[in-house]
Amino acid sequence: MAADPTSAGAIVELDAVTMRFGQHTVTEPISLRIGAGEVVCIVGPSGCGKTTLLRAIAGLMRPSNGSVQIDGHDAANAPDGVAMVFQHFGLFPWKSVQANVAYPLRLRGVPKQAASQRAGELIALMGLGGFEHSYPHQLSGGMQQRTGLARALAADPRVLLMDEPFGALDAQTREVLQFELLRTWREQPVTTVFVTHSIDEAVLFGDRVVVLNGCPSAVVEVIDVKLPNRHDRDVLRSAQFIDLREHVWSLVMADAHGAQARGVRDHPVGA
């Protein structure tokens, strides 16, 4: 799913971004350029700052140093068109599927009929036809996440930010939604930054995979992923997929082993 230069989307640029919480430095200066229509996945050990970087891109947090820009605008003041999908759905429990998906359109002043029509198209795209009038508590976890994705896409975002969107789902539902999202991206490309703990997921989705490690974290490697036919489940068994997955895994585990060694050195048994 290589980026299409003619596709809708925005260019996201991180320039020497450092994130801190008080005296605690989360990331060393990180620089990254994400092209229009490109999907970039970020992986790394827990606590390395993946979600923190995502929130900086969303304009929800300001870097301690450096800058985040979307099409040349500071992320905190970027034009409309940035949508975020969280791990825990975030649906309005008192609204139906139709109303949840239409909400961002109505918020922007789109007439009710036009918003309803667009919501219906996305509901069909996400395989939710027949559940338009159902409420979140009446849906499975997978269907709730599909609704959340449809709502994020409703406003035709130029940048889609995804924070472990399938982390709370069972393995079977997760895999089904992974391939549905790939199909959706093929039909409606959008610049995407995808944070995940799943190395398989990162290799499957990403045009590039950014591996973070260290404490504070830094970019250890940016890996180009050029998987053919990634919309076919057979890609998961291909030698190319397996090699890429093992390479990313080795980078992440090298940091885990380093952290363990640092812990033993700093806190030796019997000390």
Image (cartoon, rainbow, N blue to C red):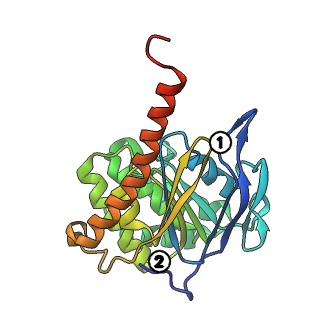
Q: Residue at x 56, y 49 (%)?
A: 50
Viewer-proximal residue among 91 and 169: 169
Residue 230 position within the rendered picture, expressed as x and y whole percent measured from the top left:
31, 74
Q: Amino acid at mark 1?
A: Val
| Tag shown at residue 69 | none
2 or 1: tag closer to the N-terminus: 1
Q: Is residue 71 left or right of residue 269?
A: right
User: Measuring 23% from the left and 71% from the top, which residue is drawn there?
Assistant: 239
Q: 68 or 135: nearer the eye?
A: 68
Provide residue 122's location: percent of width, then percent of height. Answer: 44, 69
Could you tell me residue 172's position as x and y percent?
Answer: 23, 52
Q: Are marks 2 and 1 in contact (CB under 8 Å)?
A: no
Q: Which residue is mark 1?
A: 26
Q: Of all residues shown, which one is farthest toward the bottom? A: 6
Quarter of the N terminus within the rendering: bottom left
Q: Is residue 128 above or below residue 263?
A: below
Specify the amino acid type for callout 2: Gln
Q: Dot 2 lies on which element?
A: loop
- Few, some or many residues within 10 Å of mark 1 (<14, 14–19, 20+): many
Say which residue label 2 marks: 188
* Farthest-out residue, top: 270
The tally of labels here is 2
- State which quadrant residue 8 falls in: bottom right
Q: Residue at x 34, y 53 (%)?
A: 143
User: Can residue 6 be seen here?
Assistant: yes
Neighbor class of circle 2 (other Cα within 10 Å; few <14, some 14-19, many 20+) is some
Query: As rendered, which of 247 and 33 lies closer to the eye?
Result: 247
